[in-house]
Image (cartoon, rainbow, N blue to C red):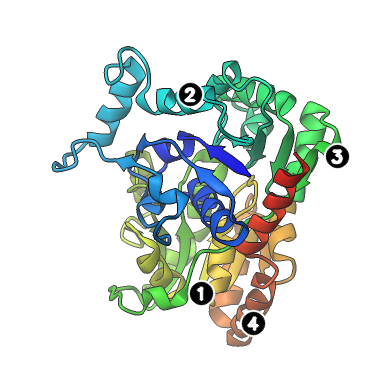
Amino acid sequence: MKVLYDYQTFQFQTFGGISRYFVELMRLLESNHKLDINLPRIYSKNSYIKQLHLPKGNVLRAVEYKDFFPNSEFKGKWSLFCLLEKWGVLTDGKSYNQVSSAERIKLQDFDIFHPTYYETYFLEHIGSKPFVLTVHDMIHEALCESVPTFNVPLIQQKKELIERCSKIIAVSESTKQAIIKMYNTEADKIRVVHHGNSMNPADGLTVTMKLPQKYVLYVGRRDFYKNFDCLIRSLAPLLKKDKDFYLICAGGAPLKDNEVKQLKTFDVENKVLYYDIDDNRLVQLYSHAQAFIFPSLYEGFGIPILEAFACGCPVLLNDIAVFHEVAEDAAIYFKADNEESTREAVLNIINDDQLKCRLKKDGGRRLACFSWEKTAESTYEVYKEL
């Protein structure tokens, strides 16, 4: 079976759950199920593609990722590349990465196509070949009423692909139900395939980081639906009262001016620390944290929950359905829109060693329910049906 993927997530993500998912999927489908996997050559700064190590002769060895100005590093380098891509300067008026994928699709030398995001460029080239669409979340659709300009083109493209694809992979039951509700999609067109975990505690053993003795950890981007501003309001009294207690933000770009302004308003600008990360540093941050806290209003799955479980880090989650689906009773839940509820959850973790031990044990048990091998196996079954 020949499966073709495309460039999309690898162009806009250096790190992130979507690109990690596709790299793990491609690696395991090739190694465990002997599928003929192909990804057309692309310009990419994605960390996971660069870390792929596969046996000699493996089909994925043909993946050619390129850097832009490979011998030069300067601020705005990747923004310049994306701008040139948008203007078509690199390939006679068209996107280099998109052209590369489109040309491979036109050859029709594949059995199944699996796009890595929601661009619709391939529809005019795919003919009668089946394609599988992974829907990672329904955040844009869920929030478009409160934020009318929230990426309307993406919503329209995604809707078209949901209607035209051969099969949908939803990363959670919550996402599946949202697709059915919002687009009236037939339930039997959707297969729920959970994510796995890539975090290995052994990876952090050689990393030395100077960290506070007592902190809770926030991981990833801080877009408005991530509810970071509410988290700051909730934790500010604790951060001010306890001189040894900190909030660490890992990844997701340095704190923005408006975030720094908010921290200054609450007089906690020195108690909220930002760390740039790779997987090894992230292991260290999880492993030494009092807890990992996830206050998002909406998620499709929540890979950081599994990462925290893997590193023996207690987990605090906003009380939403998808988090219960992933963590079940291996986490403490709080109402993220309620400052007192959030503070109480954090204080319970900090002050109760028995609770921490119980959550670490339960997290390890719950983690065993998820793996990328299971993800690949279930995806393979979807491909076989087509």
Amino acid type for the residue under numbered disc 3: Asp
Q: Which residue is mark 2?
A: 102
Task: Name the secondary structure under disc 2.
Answer: helix
Q: Would you place residue 22 above or below residue 314 in this image?
A: above
Q: Residue at x 53, y 20 (%)?
A: 121
Q: Which residue is mark 3?
A: 188
Q: Which residue is mark 1?
A: 311
Task: Name the secondary structure under disc 3.
Answer: helix
Of 323 and 264, nearer the camera is 323
Q: How busy is the neighbourhood of tag 1: few (under 14 within 10 Å), some, or many (20 plus)?
A: many
Q: Which residue is mark 4?
A: 361
Task: Report x, y in % for residue 312.
Answer: 54, 77
Upstream in the sequence, badge 2 or badge 1? 2
Upstream in the sequence, badge 4 or badge 2? 2
Amino acid type for the residue under numbered disc 4: Lys
Left or right, 301 with respect to 48, comes to right
Amino acid type for the residue under numbered disc 1: Cys
* CB under 8 Å between discs 2 and 1: no
Q: Disc 4 versus disc 2: distance between alpha carbons? A: 48 Å
Residue at far bottom of view:
354
* CB under 8 Å between discs 1 and 3: no
